[in-house]
Image (tube, helix red, strand yellow):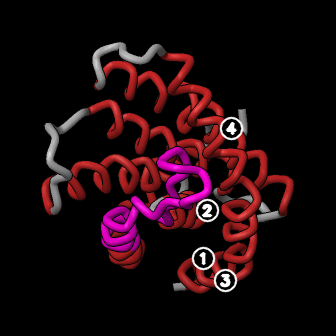
Amino acid sequence: MRYIKKFPVSLFELKDIRSLAVIAMLLALRIVLGMFANATLPMFGNTVKFSAAFIPIAVTGAMFGPVPAGLVGALGDVLSFLIAPTGGAYFPGFTVSGLLTGLIYGFALYNEKLSLPRIAIAWAVNALVVESFMAAYWLYILYGQQPDYWFYLSARGISLAVKCAPEILILFALGKPVTALSRKLMKK
């Protein structure tokens, strides 16, 4: 029940001009970081791709809650496509994934102590729901069901296993500065 209350509280974060300015900057950062999403590790082929685009979404979730974080995730995907199209057509599935990523991080981290277990759980839920099952399904739809869904799912599993520790540690390292910045903004 307490997590459901985070939704309307985070909606009111959008009424404050300072919050909107910070959210807009985090959205811009999400777009810029999303443009560098194709860094791959040669030892894993094209299976493991690193991107820091999740950081502004998670930070928005921790500072402002699920509604602004969901907006940063969804708008970040749409605006990234409009600013720097990758050559293919726009696919709304990844926008839904961005929205859900923001909601997950917002519900898990907003108004909470940013401990390592809490961050790891938020990352794991996002990894399982959005980055594994949904991303594999979107790729399965996009590429005409060839190869099959399980191929895409196993490739996502390898990618997430490699990225797990670095991404969780990055979010944990940002925990104290994000909390301090949030408190400063709240004092107004």
Give me the residue at 72% from left, 60% from top. Answer: 168
- Residue 102 in view: no
* Distance (Cα) linking label 1 and label 4: 24 Å
Q: Earlier in the sequence, mark 3 or mark 1?
A: 3
Which of the two discs, 2 and 4, sits closer to the camera? 4
Q: Residues within 10 Å of mark 2 (few under 14, many from 20)?
A: many
Q: Is residue 93 magenta?
A: no
Give me the residue at 50% from left, 54% from top. Answer: 49
Q: Residues within 10 Å of mark 4 (few under 14, many from 20)?
A: some
- Residue 163 in view: yes
Residue under label 4: 125
Give me the residue at 56% from left, 17% from top. Answer: 150
Residue under label 3: 177
- Label 4 element class: helix
Any mark on residue 140, and which?
none
* Distance (Cα) linking label 2 and label 1: 8 Å
Residue under label 1: 182
Which of the two discs, 3 and 1, sits closer to the camera? 3
Residue under label 2: 62
Front-most of residues 184 and 145: 145
